[in-house]
Amino acid sequence: MSKKVRVAIIGVGNCASSLIQGVEYYRNASREDRVPGLMHVDLGGYHISDIEFSAAFDIDREKVGYDLGEAIFRGQNNTVVFAKVGKLGVPVHRGMTHDGLGKYLSEVIVKAPGPTADIVKILKETKTDVVVNYLPVGSEAATKWYTEQILEAGCAMVNCMPVFIAREDYWRKRFEEHKLPIIGDDIKSQVGSTIIHRVLTRLFQERGVELEHTYQLNFGGNTDFLNMLERERLVSKKISKTNSVLSQLQHPMDKDDVHIGPSDYVPWLKDRKWAHIRMEGKAFGDVPLTVDLKLEVHDSPNSAGIVIDAVRCCKLGLDRGLGGALEGPASYFMKSPPFQVSDERAHELTGAFIAGRVAAACISDPEETVAPRQVNLGGNGLATGAPQRDATPVGSES
């Protein structure tokens, strides 16, 4: 059992930059202390400093061929710089394009020359444990192509993008057959527009307020928002964000009463994202109740801590010989997991998974447990929203 978590990255954009900076920033964090910004310093015996970057893939000529530690600050990347990162000794290889480069991105990104690298060979030779998918929204064919490479190479996967892999029976079964863990789909930010909207929706539900209309409008200045100006690429993203929020309601809402999704690109915001959320409901005596909220975040760092936890959960899954979707962590870390549960329940199940009290299928098969001899680990988590399907209790956390 390796004491390191070897991580490869597909797509060396702002999210990759924040992830790599974060690993450096928290490298010396105390295992015993509560550290601001982190959900877990130590997760199941793996410290943040145990994460090592093994390989990286991109198509941008400003990044391909450069050391990963340099590439994260090149090209169109414009996220906040909060940590010094030296050379990592990891070259950025030429990846596969497929549908990864949309209309607007192709106006600011030039493809690197040369053929696609041998992804499977590189992942195997670098002894990669977990591959993180950071492809642009709408990269349906590219994500599925990379997923095949990941399976063939024998790696776990964290699918941060709203291309449905972990939640689909076909792909879940493929990972189960290969005894490889997957956490997906579509990363939740630590405190982002979706998690806040979910929690408020759940609050309306639990306090007896009928939600009649709601919207969530998001805009920012990074290439993610530039890419999403191409509305055809937004289908899965809108589905993912909308279903994540509406999963907190016991009763359906008419589609005309809900609007959730990216709305515009404002270049001077750079990697900042502004989200406007409005909720209109009926309270006691049918009296109107309205919530108007604005959230401002640096978009990419807001998800990096989640990915740091997700890759370590995948490594625990590999250590324990688990295959398929890790349902507890997926419900906690992702907008579109295989099964939606309340955020409180997702938090509980993730803690139980880390501690080794439940295995991969803790929601679809609550009786599935990890053999006690395989684990001797503890841990905690953060929190998110409400159920379509809740598992039976797993007992108190240690």
Image (cartoon, rainbow, N blue to C red):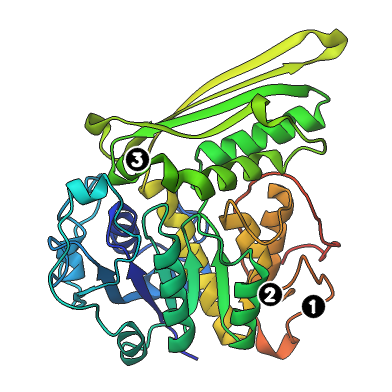
Instruction: Check disc 1 and report the residue beneath it.
Output: 368
Q: Is residue 154 visible?
A: no
Q: Is residue 135 visible?
A: yes
| Crowding near the residue tagged with mark 1, few <14, some 14–19, many ≥20 C-alpha atoms within 10 Å | some
| Crowding near the residue tagged with mark 2, few <14, some 14–19, many ≥20 C-alpha atoms within 10 Å | many
Which picture quadrant has residue 227? Answer: top left
Mark 1 to mark 2 CA distance (whole Å): 8 Å
- The earlier-in-sequence mark between 1 and 2 is 2
Mark 3 to mark 1 CA distance (whole Å): 41 Å
137 on left or right of 203: left
Mark 3 to mark 2 CA distance (whole Å): 34 Å
Residue type at the position of mark 1: Glu
Q: Residue 141 in the image: state x and y as whole percent.
A: 43, 65
Which picture quadrant has residue 352? Answer: bottom right
Instruction: Check disc 2 and report the residue beneath it.
Output: 360
Judge depth for marks 3 and 2 and give the one in front.
Answer: 3
Residue in front for this viewpoint, 218 or 345: 218
Q: Residue 59 in the image: state x and y as whole percent.
A: 22, 65
368 on left or right of 19: right
Residue at horizontal 16%, vertical 69%?
64
User: Circles 1 and 2: CB distance less than 8 Å?
Assistant: yes
Instruction: Check disc 3 and report the residue beneath it.
Output: 225
Residue in front for this viewpoint, 324 or 345: 324
